[in-house]
Image: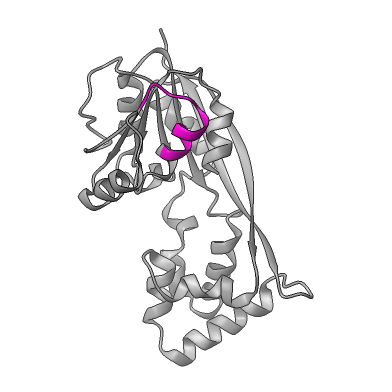
């Protein structure tokens, strides 16, 4: 998804990028590899993620620092582009974050972000929560489709308009996600972070088994055992007005 997003933005070489919510540095590394930037600054509130991003990004054009997306520690007009990958829905006031992104880019600079389509096209999660809610209606409150209503094109465009960004547009990206068999699909839910693994691991064993078998029956498993799903993302971009 990061590759498609960076290519879609098509910034000229030697641009100055800001990667908000950089996490472990995946989007930063994609920008470095595909966009020929002059520099990429990654920002994240987590010291742990910043340390990981530094460790895995061996490029003098990259730098990382801790900070809050809602109060960016940068001067106005400092960047040519400010981007956020899979993070806007986790910010308590995303409109404020978008306004800050707009502030720190130059006039006619790019402000852009992408999020997963939790309500539909993020099929990995959709199969899980549809099965979980069918067995336990209380699970609906944990479903990202319910928790993140801004992860829809109309809401994203409205968010950018509220943040003062002009000439906004939204695009849908479908990324194939192929699992070699059911265990390949199921194993991520048995550990790691996030609402789905946490919910799954908290279930008594017999209820977890019931959930597993319900999902197995729902998935489009091919004759060779592979499972071909789609991970859909919504991307939005716009321009800081002059």
Front residue of this view, candidates 14 and 159: 14
Q: Which residue is drawn at 46% across and 67% down?
A: 140
Q: Where residue 163 appears, x then y in whole percent?
A: 37, 26
Image-quadrant location for residue 32: top left
Asked which quadrant contains residue 86, the reply is top left
Residue at 58% x, 29% y: name it. 8
Would you say residue 31 sits in the magenta stretch? Answer: yes
Question: Quarter-wise, where is residue 109 in the image?
Answer: top left
Q: In screen coordinates, is 16 left or right of 112? A: left
Residue 180 painted magenta: no
Quarter of the image with the C terminus in it:
top left
Marks counted in the figure total: 0
Can residue 100 be spotted in the picture?
yes
Residue 77 vs 211, above or below: the answer is above
Q: Can residue 113 be seen in this view?
A: no
Q: In which quarter of the image is the N terminus?
A: top right
- Residue 53, percent across and down? 32, 46
State left or right for residue 104 relative to residue 112.
left
What colour scheme governs how the chains and residues are painted in the rendered image of this protein? one colour
Residue 120 vs residue 179, the one in the foreground? 179
At a point 54% along the width and 63% down the height, the residue shown is 125
Q: Which residue lies furthest to the right in this view?
A: 223
Q: Position of residue 222 (x, y in %)?
A: 76, 72
User: Residue 144 in the image: x percent, y percent?
Assistant: 46, 58
User: Which residue lies most toward the top here?
Assistant: 242
Picture layout, residue 150 above or below residue 134 = above
Instruction: Name the residue: 62% across, 76% down.
Output: 182
The residue segment tinted magenta is 29-39
């Amino acid at each position: 998804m990061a590759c498609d997003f960076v290519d879609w933005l098509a910034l000229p070489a030697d641009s100055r990028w800001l990667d908000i919510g950089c996490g472990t540095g995946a989007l930063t590394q994609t920008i470095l590899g595909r966009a020929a930037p002059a520099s990429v600054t990654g920002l994240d509130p987590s010291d742990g993620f910043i340390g990981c991003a530094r460790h895995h990004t061996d490029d003098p054009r990259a730098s990382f620092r801790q900070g809050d997306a809602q109060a960016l520690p940068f001067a106005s007009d400092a960047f040519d582009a400010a981007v956020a990958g899979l993070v806007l829905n986790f910010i308590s006031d995303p409109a404020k974050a978008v306004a800050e992104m707009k502030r720190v880019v130059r006039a006619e600079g790019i402000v852009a972000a992408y999020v997963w389509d939790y309500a539909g096209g993020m099929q990995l999660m959709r199969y899980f929560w549809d099965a979980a809610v069918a067995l336990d209606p209380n699970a609906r409150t944990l479903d990202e489709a319910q928790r993140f209503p801004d992860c829809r094109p109309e809401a994203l465009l409205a968010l950018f308009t509220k943040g003062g960004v002009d000439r906004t547009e939204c695009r849908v990206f479908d990324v194939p996600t192929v699992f070699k068999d059911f265990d390949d699909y199921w194993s991520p839910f048995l550990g790691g972070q996030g609402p789905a693994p946490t919910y799954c691991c908290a279930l008594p064993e017999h209820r977890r088994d019931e959930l597993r078998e319900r999902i197995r029956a729902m998935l489009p498993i091919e004759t060779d055992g592979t499972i071909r799903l789609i991970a859909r993302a919504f991307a939005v971009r716009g321009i800081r007005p002059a």
